[in-house]
Amino acid sequence: MEKQQKYPLGAEHYNLFEEIGSGATATIYRAVCIPTQETVAIKVLDFEKENTELCKIAHEARTMTLMDQPNLLKAHCSFVTDHYLWVVMPFMSAGSCLHIMKSAFPDGFEEAVIATILREVLKGLVNIHQHGDIHRDVKAGNILMDSRGAIKLCDFGASASLFDEGKRLHGRKTFTGTPCWIAPEVLEGKEYDFKADIWSLGITALELAHGHAPLSEFPPMKVLMEILRCKPPGLDYGRDNKFSKSFRKMIEKCLVKDLHKRLSAQELLKHPFFKKARSSEYLTRTLLKELPSLANSAKESKIKEFVVIQKKLAEVERGETGRYKKGFSGWNFDVEAIKTQASQLPDGEEEVEHLLPSLIRSSC
Ligand SMILES: Nc1ncnc2c1ncn2[C@@H]1O[C@H](COP(=O)(O)OP(=O)(O)OP(=O)(O)O)[C@@H](O)[C@H]1O
């Protein structure tokens, strides 16, 4: 007898419920697999949507199916219905760390929680890097948690391989990611490798400590210039005195501009800061107590995001700020906005314009 697929292929086998998240490329729903009655999450990507890059979508679905490490979100299966790709995956009921912060911890998490989350993310990154891949979009919005406190890194839409037809490439040069989290060598269009994820992890550590990433209040062009020109961000001696020296030192090891001096994921895992990491049960106890359901918090954060966008648009209309695409931690890189801002640069800031060609190149 033919072996029955645990996760059947075809939209008719799933009941879709409320939307639990959305990103630049997809909408994510809570769903139930009808034959098994298991709750799952389904990421629906529209092939016909403007700006959709088919090779990126196919790459993400393939990568998600091949993942095999407890800290990486593995897809159960994927299939095409009409012009939509459905990716069926485990339901991470607490949502992303960004959602958790927005819902209940607007000023960030305590240190033991951060150490626990980042240790799990690092284990996932060690696996990705060992397979010759780079994630390229490490941030709180892409770190998911389930009801038992398990942590998984998701969104492999931006990931890339350091191997081509079996041959190791020296590095990659195309640009992708979300501005505040992007390593300087990536912005400069230089060759980069898996160490770019370690820079993003350092920025994510600051995001988890403060509730937002450094520079997230600025428009993209200013973010780019600050990352390139200024010294790396870090914990502030005054404002952040509730955090330990080992946390500050760990962030410093991630946010080194020279990628050759930056630690690898494996080396970073041995840093004393991670001795503060606790169990997944500790995460559920500390974070999930009063967290609203994911569907409600997704609805609420959409409303909050709408209010932020309206405020920004009003500021733009009053000429108080540059163009702004989407709310704080959620905006993605908008090449048109960057071009507009570059053309409006005052004297002495033209040097950033030479970066644009490398930023605009396709990441596929
Ligand atoms: N398996 C899941 N379980 C629960 N929530 C999820 C799941 N997958 C995604 N989400 C929610 O949906 C959001 C968007 O998901 P994801 O980052 O995969 O979409 P995207 O379109 O690729 O986003 P981006 O704009 O970062 O490219 C996440 O931040 C998370 O809140």
Image (cartoon, rainbow, N blue to C red):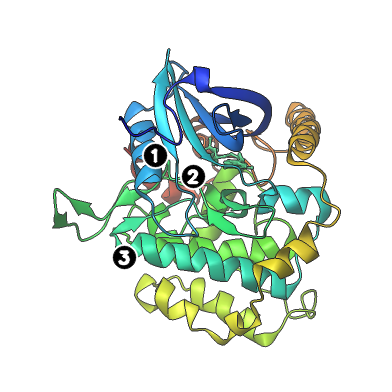
- Of labels 3 and 2, earlier in sequence is 3
Question: In the rendered picture of this protein, how many numbered marks are placed on residues?
Answer: 3
Kindly check if marks 1 and 3 are in contact, taking CB atoms under 8 A apart as contact. no
Kindly check if marks 1 and 2 are in contact, taking CB atoms under 8 A apart as contact. yes
Task: Answer whether residue 99 is visible to the viewer in this image.
Answer: yes
Q: Give the Cα distance between marks 3 and 2.
A: 18 Å
Q: Position of residue 279 (x, y in %)?
A: 66, 72
- In the current view of this chain or complex, which residue is farthest to the front? 1
Who's the residue at 36% across and 34% down the image?
56
Q: Which residue is mark 2?
A: 155
Is 237 situated left or right of 130 in this image? right
Q: Is mark 1 within 8 Å of ligand 1?
A: yes
Element at label 2: loop
Q: Which residue is mark 1?
A: 60
Q: Is mark 2 within 8 Å of ligand 1?
A: yes
Q: Position of residue 263 (x, y in %)?
A: 42, 77
Q: Which residue is mark 3?
A: 130
Element at label 1: helix
User: Which quadrant holds residue 168?
Assistant: bottom left
